[in-house]
Image: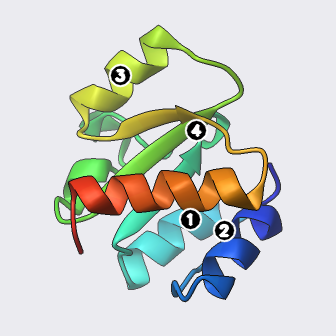
Amino acid sequence: MEVARLVEPLESAGYRVTGATTFEAAVQTLAERPPHLLIAAERLRVVQRPASGAARRFDHPQMAAIVTAGAKDPVLEAEAATFGASCAVAPRNSTEILALVTRIFAMRPM
C-alpha cells in the first residue's frame, strides 16, 4: 500500500501523521521525532535486531509499532512480537486503516 493511502485517512481522522517512502526517510523521522505509532511495511525491515545499527523498535519503548504484511505470516508475527510490535495484514482501505490504528491505541493509549 502506498504511503499516501495510509497517511490521508489518518490525517482526516485528526491524527498527526508523517509518511516515509524509504527506509532512510523512516530512520531520519524516528531520529528527529519518534511517533506514538509506527506502521512499517514488512519489506522496509524497520523492526531489526540491535546489531544492525538501523532504526530499532526498542530505541523508542513508548512507541507502538505495527508491521504490515501482504498476507497472514506466523513467522513475521512471532518476530514482530519479539520486539513488542503487532503484525497485521496490510490494510486495503481507509476503514481498515482507521480500525487498525483505533485497535492499537485502545490496547496502548498515547
Q: Earlier in the sequence, mark 3 or mark 4?
A: 4
Circle 2 — which element?
loop
* N-term-proximal mark, 1 vs 2: 2
Residue at the disc numbered 3: 79
Q: Which residue is mark 1?
A: 26
Badge 2: residue crowd in 10 Å (few <14, some 14–19, many ≥20): some
Please provide percent x and percent y for residue 64: 31, 57
Q: Position of residue 95 (x, y in %)?
A: 69, 57
In the rendered structure, which amino acid carries the disc numbered 1?
Ala
In the displayed structure, 72 sits above or below 65; it is above
Residue type beneath disc 2 = Ala
Q: Work out whether 88 lies above or below 9.
A: above
Comes first in the chain, label 4 or label 2:
2
Q: Nearer the viewer, residue 9 or 46?
A: 9
In-image side of 51 versus 20 (left or right) = left
Amino acid on which disc 3 is placed: Glu
At a point 68% along the width and 85% down the height, the residue shown is: 12
Which residue does the numbered mark 2 point to in the structure image?
A: 20
Neighbourhood count class around disc 4 (C-alpha, 10 Å): few under 14, some 14–19, many 20 upward: many
Give the Cα distance between marks 3 and 4: 12 Å
Crowding at label 1, few (<14), some or many (≥20) Cα neighbours within 10 Å? many
Horizontal and vertical percent position of residue 38 = 45, 60
Q: Amino acid at mark 4?
A: Thr
- Looking at the image, tell me whether mark 1 or mark 3 is earlier in sequence order: 1
The residue lying furthest to the top in this view is 75
Give the residue at x 32% y 41%. Answer: 85
Identify the element where label 4 is drawn. strand
Mark identifier at residue 68: 4
Q: Looking at the image, can residue 30 be seen?
A: yes
Coloring applied to the structure: rainbow
Distance of mark 1 from mark 2, alpha carbons?
5 Å
